[in-house]
């Protein structure tokens, strides 16, 4: 375990290549959720700081240093940033653990490699992004250009702070945009740390600016700023709706990655060993603070008791504890407020008629902190609030079903459409169900995998647009059509 003080984490805003105090000097307390104690304070950016950051991003966008940079040089910068993150992986994983309460092993083995891979993946794109010639009628040469959009405001949540930031930065920069990034107030540290690495990699000042602060202050300033061309957001559906409304004023481009309530289906013809083993990880990984968590487990009736047992055993086996301890599988929830929300949902489920078969309350961990037991609810109906609303914690609802038609109706009976998973050995059924489910990602005999090459995003109220892959970079471009008369 690396002592927090040894990490020398930057805690000031990163604007135009420099760490700076907020204009009014304000700072806020940053809490370590595994202890409930303060990690110190962080600069609290407000509208004045967002103004400065947007101005720096605009100047960088228009500058020859960035706009005139050869695609191949932009690729090298992105690869270098990936290498620097890899080089600083221990420190970044430790910071992520202090900030979020997640297990250090997960941060080190998942968040960090995913961030590095995402940067390397998008580093390959600048020299491959290109327009087309268009076969129009008449004596014209007509072609398209793919241009960057401009200044992008990026707002990210607290569950995978560094990875979410990189997932947004990489395609935006690969396409030639400049960015003002606002990390979540609970977890500003790894994003702010990037400032030094961006400088070291050689990004011109102003290309990326990082403004820590509150959603209602820095966030609002960013989504309403007249000189921000696009807002890319990951977070709750509620905030996403608000952003879309606000963006209408200046017709900002908007892309949204929002909540989920993903169905995870076990058919009677599944490879039961694999299916039963997958249940726990699909919901409890990262304390259940995962937008694609398999939070509604649908089980074909004859397997219901067996699945309940497997889920309960998995919950009981997962050690909740000190995020830096090697055998810890589940760390602390991100904040006291979020802990209370999760606990209220469990109580609500019970009052709606569900039965707690594992967990169901606080986990006692020496040193305090906001720990919650992995929890399994039986006797849940799909129309209960615990099955319809996103809990974003380690709480699984288990629901029996009759047959394929029944489970399809249940799986799609939700406002969300982010992900879905199923276990079956029947190939025809697997692809039939994959087509019928309204979700941006469907897993067959797997759950929860992501890759920078694979598009990711939501149907319905789970979002707008797709991140990752070619779709992910296309979202950061404008298409311009150029006509030339040939006569
Ligand atoms: P949230 O309240 O929507 O916050 C997300 C981000 O938006 C934070 O940086 C937040 O700042 C900022 N924000 C809040 N209000 C704002 C406003 N009025 N204007 C501009 N920015 C504002 O979400 P959360 O509860 O922290 O995060 C959990 C949610 O994120 C879950 O619902 C989860 O499903 C979703 N999520 C989705 C994905 C995905 O890829 N689809 C991934 C991860 C999480 P503050 O921190 O200061 O509030
Ligand atoms: Mg924190």
Image: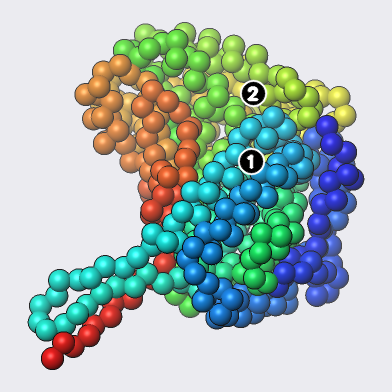
As measured in the structure, the alpha-carbon distance from the residue carrying label 1 to the one carrying label 2 is 25 Å
Q: Earlier in the sequence, mark 1 or mark 2?
A: 1
The residue that label 1 is drawn on is 112
Whether residue 328 appears in this view of the structure is yes
Question: For this view, does 455 lie left or right of residue 294?
Answer: left
Q: Nearer the viewer, residue 73 or 217?
A: 73
Numbered disc in front, either 1 or 2 = 1
Question: If the image is split into quadrants, where does the N terminus sit?
Answer: top right
Residue 91's spot in the image, x, y percent? Answer: 77, 42
User: Looking at the image, which residue is at 53% across and 64% down?
Assistant: 73
What mark, if any, has residue 374 been given in the picture?
A: 2
- Height in image: 315 above or below 407? above
Q: Nearer the viewer, residue 202 or 417?
A: 202
Find numbered disc 2 in the image and state the secondary structure of the residue it sits on: loop
- Height in image: 46 above or below 459? below
Residue 30's spot in the image, x, y percent? Answer: 81, 50
């Amino acid at each position: 375990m690396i002592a927090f003080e040894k990490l020398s984490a930057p805690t000031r805003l990163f604007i135009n290549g420099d760490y700076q105090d907020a204009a009014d000097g304000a700072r806020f307390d940053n809490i370590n959720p595994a202890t409930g104690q303060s990690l110190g304070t962080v600069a609290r950016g407000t509208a004045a700081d967002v103004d400065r950051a947007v101005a720096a991003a605009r100047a960088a966008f228009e500058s020859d240093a960035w706009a005139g940079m050869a695609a191949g040089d932009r690729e090298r910068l992105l690869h270098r940033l990936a290498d620097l993150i890899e080089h600083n992986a221990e420190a970044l994983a430790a910071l992520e653990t202090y900030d979020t309460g997640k297990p250090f092993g997960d941060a080190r083995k998942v968040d960090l490699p995913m961030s590095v891979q995402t940067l390397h993946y998008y580093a390959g794109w600048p020299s491959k992004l290109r327009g087309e010639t268009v076969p129009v009628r008449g004596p014209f040469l007509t072609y398209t250009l793919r241009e960057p959009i401009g200044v992008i405001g990026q707002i990210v949540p607290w569950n995978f702070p560094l990875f979410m930031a990189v997932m947004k930065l990489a395609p935006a920069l690969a396409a030639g945009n400049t960015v003002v990034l606002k990390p979540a107030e609970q977890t500003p540290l790894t994003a702010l740390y990037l400032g030094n690495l961006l400088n070291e990699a050689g990004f011109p000042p102003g290309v990326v600016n990082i403004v820590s602060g509150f959603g209602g202050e820095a966030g609002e300033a960013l989504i309403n700023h007249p000189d921000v061309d696009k807002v890319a957001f990951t977070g709750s559906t509620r905030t996403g709706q608000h952003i879309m409304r606000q963006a209408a004023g200046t017709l900002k481009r908007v892309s949204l990655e929002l909540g989920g309530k993903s169905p995870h289906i076990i058919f009677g013809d599944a490879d039961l060993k694999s299916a039963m083993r997958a249940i726990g990880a699909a919901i409890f990984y990262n304390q259940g603070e995962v937008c694609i968590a398999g939070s509604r487990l649908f089980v074909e009736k004859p397997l219901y008791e067996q699945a309940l047992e497997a889920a309960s055993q998995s919950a009981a086996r997962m050690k909740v504890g000190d995020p830096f301890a090697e055998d810890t599988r589940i760390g602390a929830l991100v904040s006291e407020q979020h802990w209370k929300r999760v606990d209220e949902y469990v109580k609500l489920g019970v009052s709606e008629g569900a039965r707690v078969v594992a967990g169901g309350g606080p986990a006692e961990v020496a040193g305090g902190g906001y720990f919650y037991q992995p929890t399994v609810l039986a006797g849940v109906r799909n129309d209960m609030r615990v099955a319809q609303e996103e809990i974003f914690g380690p709480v699984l609802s288990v629901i029996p079903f009759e047959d394929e038609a029944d489970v399809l109706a249940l799986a799609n009976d939700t406002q969300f459409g982010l992900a879905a998973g199923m276990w079956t050995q029947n190939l025809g059924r697997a692809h039939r169900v994959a087509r019928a489910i309204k979700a941006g990602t469907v897993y067959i005999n797997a759950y929860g995998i992501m890759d920078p090459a694979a598009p990711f995003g939501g149907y319905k109220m789970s979002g707008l647009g797709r991140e990752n892959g070619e779709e992910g970079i296309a979202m950061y471009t404008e298409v311009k059509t150029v006509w030339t008369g040939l006569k």
